[in-house]
Amino acid sequence: MKYVVLQVTLKEKFVGTGSGNLTELEKVINDQAAKGYRLHTISTTNSSSKGLLGGDRIQATMVFEKIN
């Protein structure tokens, strides 16, 4: 496969600012790099949660390209 498309949902911290799981995003990128892919494109979509724990969600869609 020449391209791989993956999505990761980043959850905002309940208290304070910043994402609570940037290490998960970093792991996905590093895992694909180890397989010979590089990050070609990333796009994000924001949504908010009105549930008990609240917090915003950012859906990151990444396209990885195989390095020849």
Image (spheres, rainbow, N blue to C red):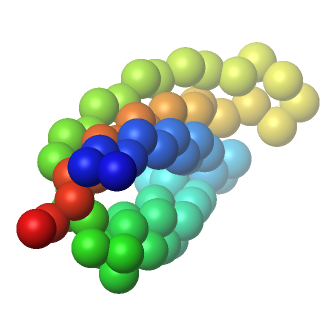
Point out residue 54 in the picture as x, y percentages from the top left corner: 74, 31
Point out residue 45 in the picture as x, y percentages from the top left corner: 41, 23
The quarter holding residue 67 reads bottom left
Residue that appears at 29% across and 32% down = 43
Residue that appears at 20% across and 41% down = 41
Q: Residue furthest left?
A: 68
- In this picture, is 6 found above or below 52? below
Q: Is residue 52 left or right of residue 59?
A: right
Residue that appears at 68% across and 47% down = 14
The residue lying toward the viewer, choosing from 8 and 58, is 8
Q: Is residue 55 left or right of residue 66?
A: right
Point out residue 66 in the picture as x, y percentages from the top left corner: 22, 59
The residue lying toward the viewer, choosing from 19 and 33, is 33
Which quadrant of the rendered structure holds the C terminus?
bottom left
- In this picture, is 50 found above or below 17? above
- In this picture, is 45 found above or below 30? above
Residue that appears at 36% across and 75% down = 35
Residue 45 visible (yes or no): yes
The residue lying toward the viewer, choosing from 30 and 56, is 30
How many callouts does the rendering have?
0
Q: Residue furthest bottom?
A: 34
Residue 17 visible (yes or no): no
Point out residue 30 in the picture as x, y percentages from the top left corner: 37, 75
